[in-house]
Amino acid sequence: MSTFRRRAAALVTSAAAALTGALTWVAGASPAGAATGCAVTYRITSQWPGGFGADVTVTNLGDTINGWTLGWSFTAGQQISQSWNAAVTQTGTAVTAGGVDYNRTIASNASVSFGFNGSWNSTNPAPASFTLNGVTCTGGVSSTPSASPTRSPSPSPSFSPSPSPSASPTPSPTPALGRITVWLAGDSTVANSSGAPIVGWGRELGQYLTTDATVVNNAVGGRSVQTWLYESAVTDRMNSSGECALSSTAYASRWQSMLNASTGMKAGDYLFIQFGINDGSPTCPRHVGAARYRELLTTMVGAARQRGANPVLVTPVAALTCSGSTATPNRGFVTDTFAVGTATGAPVIDLHKLSYTLYNSLRFCPYNGDYTSGPVGAFFANDHTHFEAAGARQIAGLVAGAVRDQRLGLAAYLR
């Protein structure tokens, strides 16, 4: 998702709307008593014959908005079929997108983002203009009355508005946020990449966070929680309790580095933990039983807290399995993940339920098993488990939305 610099200039020129193309508008208007203005980026993130996906980001360049509606019109018969992070409706060519509970308010200099899938015919041009709360985006920021100084452009967007001299009252500035690291531990559905075109949601999570939060993705494809923690020390034989035996209790270097007092997790950081996909293997080294799974997750939660970091448990993201026209649950260890959350007090994001619910909202079922074309092909990477970039971006959006919905402290770092 693109970010924006405030500009005093008028309309920003743009490239043609094509696959991965983007258009940006800088807008302003002056309803009585409030400084208003916005920047809008409309970006086509994926396109296939007859269908496309798009991301839209709205940056508020004026005073705080409590309740927003973005409007535009399509000119080539495009029709929106699904949306996320906004309530989107279409009547004829006219489209409106409104804020939902967790992004209804846009602070000054802050942004909200949403996305949608739609259909197109012969051409797929970007909208020619936008309106924000009924005001046409036509130019720079203005204020009525104009007694207070014009706001100067900020060098870069920030999550919290920076205080500046003004003759009129302004809201108290939000205290500056400290820099934190968001650490990720998981498997291929989280990892940056496990080979083209596979992209894990962890690679896309940073798009939803401000620059004060850095994502360090230590997820590795093919790992259960035990092989992620111990790597080659997990042998191919089972012990008397039915668990894969360890040749050594030494942690893998990835976990050791995260536990390092100088370079690893520190106070205020976050640790997101998602396993449960490979753990269900009946054979070693990946096999992990329910009790061992709970034990190792509990160990990771405790280690994070010992360093002042905030652990967050994530249930395994769902694969796409259909029962007729319905995407269905299909992962194990969901109950066990919640059990660890209950026992330790760590928050749990139910990405399993959120993901198959998303598949239903996108109407992925029924499907013919072809992962190379159409909306399913644009979302998944040639199988029903792994994602291409467009799919990973939406899954990361589910995680970010859950952070906001559950009011985790990390929500302060969301864009």
Image (spheres, rainbow, N blue to C red):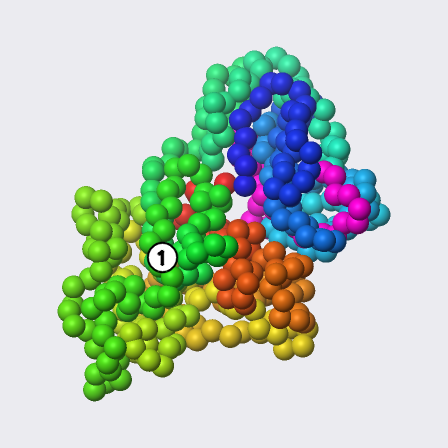
Q: Quadrant of residue 362?
A: bottom right
105 in magenta? yes
SS at mark 1 in the image: loop
Q: Which segment did they paint magenta?
A: 101-126
Residue at left offset 72%, top offset 53%? 49
Residue at left offset 54%, top offset 37%? 2
Q: Nearer the viewer, residue 198 or 6?
A: 198
Q: How many marks?
A: 1
Tell me if residue 37 comes above or below residue 201 in the rendering.
above
208 in magenta? no
Residue at left offset 47%, top offset 48%? 204
Which residue corresponds to mark 1? Answer: 219
Q: Is residue 58 visible?
A: yes
Q: Is residue 48 left or right of residue 154?
A: right
Q: Is residue 298 visible?
A: no
* Residue 246: percent from left, percent from top: 19, 73
Tell me if residue 28 comes above or below residue 115 in the rendering.
above
* Residue 12: percent from left, percent from top: 65, 24
Three-letter amino acid code of the residue under disc 1: Ala
